[in-house]
Amino acid sequence: MKFKFYLLTFFVFTLTFVACNKDDGGGVPPIVEEDRDEQQVIDDALLVEYLETHYYNSSMFVSNMNPKIADLIISDLPEDGVLPDPDNNTLLIDAIETHNTVYKETNYKYYVLRLNQGIGIESPNFTDNVRINYSGNFLDEEIFDSTSNPTQLDLSSLVAGWQRVLPQFNTAESFVINGDGTVEYTSHGVGVMFLPSGLGYYAGAVFGVPAYSNLIFKFELYQTEQNDHDADGIPSYLEDIDGDLDIYSDNTDDDQFSNFIDVDDDGDGTITKDEIIETIYNETTRQAILDLVLASNEVLIKIVEVEDEEGMISYDGYTVTFPDTNGNGIPNYLDEDESESFDE
């Protein structure tokens, strides 16, 4: 079963579930959501207890630039509380990173075990496609979902925890296509995320995941690809106007479409693509692209390696410039009245 399918269908399921919960005499009782702040306190205590009472085979990942999640063994601490073979094992609580984020107006803590950063030059944005392997577990180690081969997922369709953790890792350094068609990746990002229910499915008791389940996801990050869901020239991560890592909440013209799937973000009748300026710079090195001096309203969105007919390598840097015709501080593509003078 595929996690992408799970998450994409979650929204449809939710709408259907709500629609079917009217008191018609035969409906399923509606799920009453707990207070998010209160539930986070409960969830965090359970996660910390888990991290304090479990250890992993840390020596397996020392100087190992190409680890796999299959190499990871998480074990219960013995009843005497003594860590077995401390030269080769480490308590999770002593190895994890603690992160804080705000989601649904709630302060959340989540935890990351960084087994390998990955040494590829790219990291995904929270709205990008990623190619990964993963395993989804409950705190009792029961697996509820996993992949056996590299799978492409759209981070924008996944739970909030994924959108925060995957961008903290790098992709693979390189890959080789084997004779049987399989792909072997080298020096990719590998980690584990420990998520409270509020950054997972929360009250959605779906797909075999009970409501308010804390979740563990082990993952290998191989590749990433930038998403522009509405093909308007603005990458979807830049459509997060308020910077809250929730692109569904940004809707400048208050129509039925969030900006990242709206070809006319301000509803002025001129499509967004015609209200921005797209530019491509070519340089001999990647660093030269990074060193470009851009205008204050110009953003470098991606760098692509290109090879000419003679085999010479160079780099294209793609930028987007956001004109502000009337100087009111609102770029044209978000300002339905951009033709009006700022002084008027």
Image (cartoon, rainbow, N blue to C red):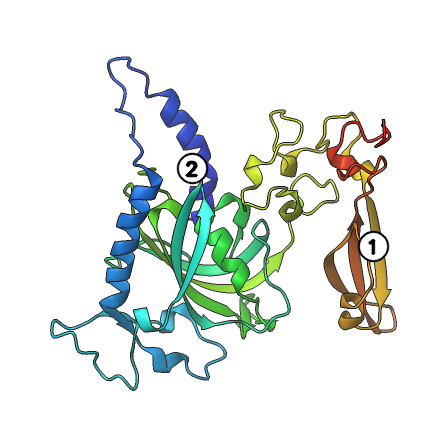
Mark 1 lies on a secondary structure that is: loop
In-front residue for pair 243/279: 243
Q: Residue furthest front?
A: 343
Q: Nearer the viewer, mark 1 or mark 2?
A: 1
Image position, residue 296 (x, y; %)? 80, 53
Badge 2 amino acid:
Phe
Badge 1 amino acid:
Ala
Image position, residue 236 (x, y; %)? 64, 45
Which is more N-terminal, label 2 or label 1?
A: 2
Reply above or below: 56 against 304: below
The residue sitting at 46% across, 47% down in the picture is 102
In-front residue for pair 237/151: 237
Q: CA distance from mark 1 to mark 2?
A: 41 Å
Pointer 1 local density, CA inside 10 Å: few below 14, some 14–19, many at least 20: few
Would residue 257 be seen by someone viewing this image from the given angle?
yes
The residue sitting at 33% across, 73% down in the picture is 94
Mark 2 lies on a secondary structure that is: helix
Image position, residue 126 (x, y; %)? 56, 52
**Residue contact at pointers 1 and 2, CB within 8 angstroms:** no
Would residue 209 be seen by someone viewing this image from the given angle?
no
In-front residue for pair 40/284: 40
The residue sitting at 72% across, 26% down in the picture is 267
Tell me: 297 left or right of 135: right
The residue beneath circle 2 is: 10
Q: Quadrant of the C terminus?
A: top right
Pointer 2 local density, CA inside 10 Å: few below 14, some 14–19, many at least 20: some
Q: Quadrant of residue 109?
A: bottom left
Disc marking residue 295? 1
Total numbered labels placed on residues in the image: 2
